[in-house]
Structure formats: C-alpha cells, structure tokens
Amino acid sequence: MAHNKLYRKLVAAKNYLEEIKAVDFSNQSCVIAVESYKAFTQYLIDHFKEIEESSHSTLYINFCTRIIPSIRYVERASTSNIPWSVIPYLDRMLKELFGSEYLLLFRPQWHFNYSVIAADLISSLKQKLDDVFPTHTDEIARLFRNRRIYVFSFPYLEKTNVLLLSTIGHELGHFYHEKWKETQRAKELLAEQKAHLSAFYRGMHQSDLFLPYEKATEGIRILEGMYREILADICGYLIFGPSMLFALDYISIFEAKVELPSQSNNYYPPTMYRIRVLYERILANDNRINLLSSQSSECGRYYQLALKRIDNYLADKKDKLSLGAISEEISLFESALPELITFALGEVRSSYLHPRQIEGLYAKLDRCIPANELEDNPVEMADIILAGWIQYSKINETSTGDNFSVSFQVLMRLLLKSIFSSHVHAEYKKAKGSKHEHLIES
C-alpha cells in the first residue's frame, strides 16, 4: 500500500513541476529551484526499486509534509507576486557578500513577518537523497552542482513597499550570525555567561534545588535570541545604513506592547530595544552618516526629523523598564556588544551606501523623477532606499488622508522604477565595457 502511494505521489509531483515550469518567474533562482525539485523527484522515480520497502511510509510522509510545501515556496515566487524590480540587485548583493553559488528566492506570505530560511533548499534535497541512497553520494552531488537557494519571506500586503525591503539587510545578517556562533570566542562567551548566570541565580535562590538551573537555562536562551537578532540588525545596518533603523521603527507600530523574550515569541528581543541599540550604539558612531545630520538642506532637515521621531519614541524607555525583569541578562549582553560590533565590522566588508549621493537622489524623488543615476552613473539600491525613507519623512510630515496615500504610492512606484533602471543602466555600461566607479567617499 505504502509502495503504491509513494510512487503515485512522486509521479504527481513530477507532473506538477512540469506545469509550474511555465510560470513567469522573476529570477534564475526560481528556475533552478524547479529544476532541482524535478531532478530530486525524477531520481527517486528512476531508482524506486532500490528504495527499501521499510522506508516507503516514512519517505511518503516526509514528501507530503516537507517537500511539497517547499515546492509551493517556488510557485508563489512568480513575477506577479513579488517586487521583481529589486531582485537583480539582491541577487548580486548575496553573491558578493557570500559567494557565487548563493541564490535568493522571494516568497510572499499572508502574515506580517519578514524572515529567511537559514537552511538552503538544495542542500536539504541532496541530504534526503543521500539518506535514501547512501552509496550514490557522488552521483547525487553532481545532480545539484553545489548551488544554494535561500528563501526570503515577506508580507504579501507589503510587496510594493520598497522601503521595507531594507529589512533584507537583517535577514542577510542571520548568515553572519551563523558564522559568529561557530567562532571560538562565541562559544567561550556563552560558556562564561552560562557560568555567571548559574552562580547569580544560585545566590538568589539558595533554598531551591531546581529554580537556579531553570533560570540560568532560560537566561542563556534569552541571550542567544538577543545575539541572533541584534547581530543580524547590526550587519543589516552596515549594508543599508539608517534604512534598517527606519524599517524597524516602521514595523514597531504593529507591536501593541513591549514583550520580554520568551519561548512563546522565540526569544525575540523587543523591537524597541533593537532600535535603541542601533540608534545609540551604531548610528551614533557612524561617521559616514554624520554629514547627513549636519546638512541644512531640505533633505538634511527631513532626515533629522525622522531621527527625532525615533528619539521621541525611545524617550519613555518602556523597553528598559520592561527588560528590568531580566536585568542580569541585559547587562551580560551589553557587555558583549562591543565584541559583536567588532565582529560585524570585520565581516561585512562591502559598502552599498554612499551618503554623499543621498541629497541628489532625494532632490530627484522630490521632483517625481526616478533616482537611478547621478552624473550618468547608476547608483546602488541602498542609496535609493535611504533617499526614499527621507522623502517618506517629508510625506509623513506634510500630507494627510488621500494626499498621503497618493504621495506614498507615487513614491513606491518611483523607487521601484529607480532601482530597476539603475540595474539596467549598470548592465548596459558593463556590456559596453565602461569602467564605472561610484562617487568616491572622502
């Protein structure tokens, strides 16, 4: 029975993959993903007689619960569902930061969440075949050609909100966090902090045998969540600059209250505290950005106004008051923060932000002109998005009601056109053999 069900499911999946090959996908990662799933399914069909009968039921359940849902990641990544204009830049960014074998697949979802699946799709397919056919390892490796596809999820309702795409910096930051976790220093630090928390809670609860252990274990999980999310924020800031800060501030309006990190929220630190760390510890020491704050132009004024809103938001210190319940964990995290910042600065070497260009790009957006180039040089997506956030600050300050909605939609269309036009311009110059360099920062 399981034998027949599994084979029918494999054949149905193969036919389904043939159908979705005709979908209009936005980038090569989707095409490669479809090819990979098809190769995976075809290999199981071609070698079906070699699969041990005892594993048919397990493989059937795994295929239904894991493989088919992940195929739907690809199906949903059609051109009509995603902000396809930004994909070429993000593809290039991922390859430059991590390697030519990395590919990014955008997946819209219905709940409001931006996330990345840290394990790539193709490695999991390869591993499953290796498990079923342990003697075919070399042949299976050749089947997938060492590619990696990572799924970046975003809220479908925000698919045209270009400004929030700066959160991709945070998602890319998770790859750096994975690297940090494997360093000797990260392991030593966690061991030191675990020992500290154990001693601290034993001192607080001397008459209880189990509570100190439970408290210390929970404290380490809280710290791990803070390292995971805030290191990703810092790396995202190094890629996108203040746009990461503005995106977090925008997202914070969806949080009704400041919640402590816990198992129920996957040990996420409060967004307000994440904003505070970027604002007080990263932005304040970013010499690249200081020149924007000092400008007396309209661009400079609305940039300063955006920062003022964040300053006002942080003023009541709700996050600090709420996190007082885990003050020892916060103290340990903040003592380790300089090491995290140093690690991020050493790892995120590519520069995608050029602050001296922002005022010129802002001026173009303000005149409803696509901000894709300056002096016939295409500009980076990070520059365009930061100029867009400053323009949004103006719209937020000067428009209400229908005027606000119309102005916001016009800005989004301008940004999408700017980003894609910049990519086309850069590709044209490359094809013509031009040696293009971005404006040099002093």
Image (cartoon, rainbow, N blue to C red):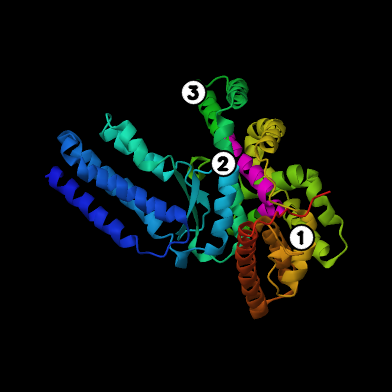
Report the residue marked by disc 2. Answer: 98
Residue 358 disc label:
1
Q: Judge depth for marks 2 and 1 and give the one in front.
A: 2
Query: Which of 2 and 16 lies nearest the eye of the viewer?
Result: 16
Identify the residue at the far front of this view.
433
Q: How many marks?
A: 3
Magenta-colored span: 223-246
Image point (26%, 53%), residue name: 13
Considering the numbered disc 3 on the image, is that residue within a helix, a strand or a loop?
Answer: loop
Q: Residues within 10 Å of mark 3 (few under 14, many from 20)?
A: few
Q: Judge depth for marks 1 and 3 and give the one in front.
A: 1
Residue 289 disc label:
none
Considering the numbered disc 1 on the image, is that residue within a helix, a strand or a loop?
Answer: helix
Query: Which of 157 and 267 lies nearest the eye of the viewer?
Result: 157
- Tell me, yes or no, if residue 420 can be seen here: yes
Q: Say which amino acid is labelled 3.
A: Phe
Q: How far apart are the alpha carbons under marks 3 and 2?
A: 44 Å
